[in-house]
Amino acid sequence: MNILVTNDDGINSRGIYDLVVALREIGEVIVMAPLAEQSAVGHALTVSLPLRVTEFHKNGNFFGFAVSGTPADCVKLALRTFLDERGLPKPDIVVSGINHGRNTAVNIIYSGTVSAATEATVLDVPAIAVSLTSYHPDADFGPAAEFMKRFTPEVARIGLPRGTLLNVNVPALPDSEIRGVAYTKQGASYWEDEFEKRLDPQERPYYWLKGSYILEDKDADIDDIAIRDGKISITPIHYDLTNYDFLEALRSSWPKVF
Amino acid sequence: MNILVTNDDGINSRGIYDLVVALREIGEVIVMAPLAEQSAVGHALTVSLPLRVTEFHKNGNFFGFAVSGTPADCVKLALRTFLDERGLPKPDIVVSGINHGRNTAVNIIYSGTVSAATEATVLDVPAIAVSLTSYHPDADFGPAAEFMKRFTPEVARIGLPRGTLLNVNVPALPDSEIRGVAYTKQGASYWEDEFEKRLDPQERPYYWLKGSYILEDKDADIDDIAIRDGKISITPIHYDLTNYDFLEALRSSWPKVF
């Protein structure tokens, strides 16, 4: 099995390292990830600047290719041009992560980790985004990496519907305390955020985003609630954003505007 | 009516200027838009850097507030902090555009124009994203601006479901040739793209994205087809990305993986 791995925390982060070490036990792994951290970058593509690729080494060994761009850039560049050019195999599956922090509810729309997996589905390759629900600097990526070692081959074997990826969030718990898997819906939790106004040394104002996350949901089949219950949350997501119910209402009951 | 206007082409672009001139005939308009062009920026939020706000003048008059960030930053900063701080009214509606180029099908996931409107719906304010389907440097934004002058008050009056925005694409045609409005679904058209490999003056390689857009759909109720038929395409979109059909399949037929 050929696996392409990327992330948004950058190629030098612990989450991608632990993921790659685990996946190398079960397949051929190619890493193509951003050189610099790219969190909250959304589904950005670099169109006004060229991209550079450099070989990245870790502990004295070749680890992967670092790209001067976003997570979506990495996946598009790999699948459209770079792998072919180097004579490298097309992946059977793309895995993006392990992100340092949860990607649930509204967070999904800001997530570079998820956008990389989405870009893979745009290009018809099955994909998984995986996150660890902890921002702690010493968070243990081990249980999430172990789970992906077992789960990735299953997803590659069974396949996914065109345009759909799996968004996996692993609770920050020891293996023995994780209470199984829940297939979930994207929740409605949100950020109660604001901008702090400060003055720089020249007394000019600037604004900096800060906020706290509000757990809005209650049902066990929602991403954040499954995690709270100690389960690995797996949400199937796609990029058809049409609100079909409201489309019917628009067609049947809105006034003629043109 | 209070209207907040933003875009992704930058505060100095023609599309936002023509939109603001038209909307100022029907309401109080506050502009808060990126200082620099932000196309294909996706739903990025600036979290690692502070934001600056400067007053932007056009033709000798105050035009609006320029922000050193993304379209989503502009909307979040305005609605969460800046308008209150300045004693400015909360908007009844947010309008993002007029984008120079179509935002249909897969383009929606890369679009800063749409992400600004999405951010407004995250913060419970109704929103419209509007684009002109032409990349021509001399494209005429007039018919799109005229349409928004009539359409925006209707949307503000009727309201939208929580979390849903309207994504409007106006064909690049004179008013007299536009053949009405179609309420549409997000289509499946896509980019046949690749990266061109070049060498810089130091003979080091770099990659630059290029591509052509492939019209995939046929049905008249799809965004790109409505536009091809000379109609204004209006697609209701939301940010619940759950693939509900596949969620059922996962729950009923996937093997136990944990």
Image: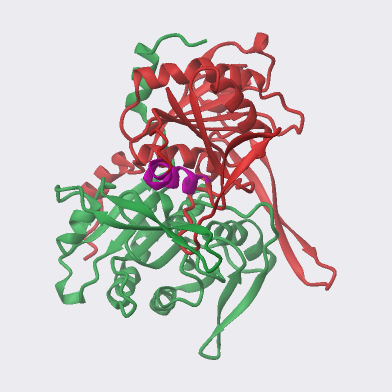
Chain colours: A red, B green
- Give coordinates of residue A187: x percent, y percent: 51, 32
The one nearer the camera, A211 or A170, is: A170
- Give coordinates of residue B16: x percent, y percent: 43, 73
Any part of residue B34 in sight = yes
Question: Is the residue A156 above or below the residue B142 in the image?
Answer: above
Question: Is the residue B224 above or below the residue A169 in the image?
Answer: below
Q: Confirm whether the magenta stretch covers residue B92.
A: no
Quarter location, residue B65:
bottom right
Relative horizontal placement of residue B146, taking residue B16 as reference (left or right): left
Q: Which residue is situated farthest in the bottom direction here?
A: B60
The one nearer the camera, B242 or B214, is: B214
The residue lying at 46 percent from left, 68 percent from top is: B9
Relative horizontal placement of residue B135, taking residue B203 as reference (left or right): left
The residue lying at 62 percent from left, 59 percent from top is: B77
The one nearer the camera, B226 or B160, is: B226
- Give coordinates of residue B196: x percent, y percent: 39, 57
Quarter location, residue A58:
top right
What range is drawn magenta here? A71-85
Magenta segment, prevailing SS (helix, strand or loop) = helix
Q: Confirm whether the magenta stretch covers residue A77.
A: yes
Question: Is the residue A49 above or below the residue B250 in the image?
Answer: below
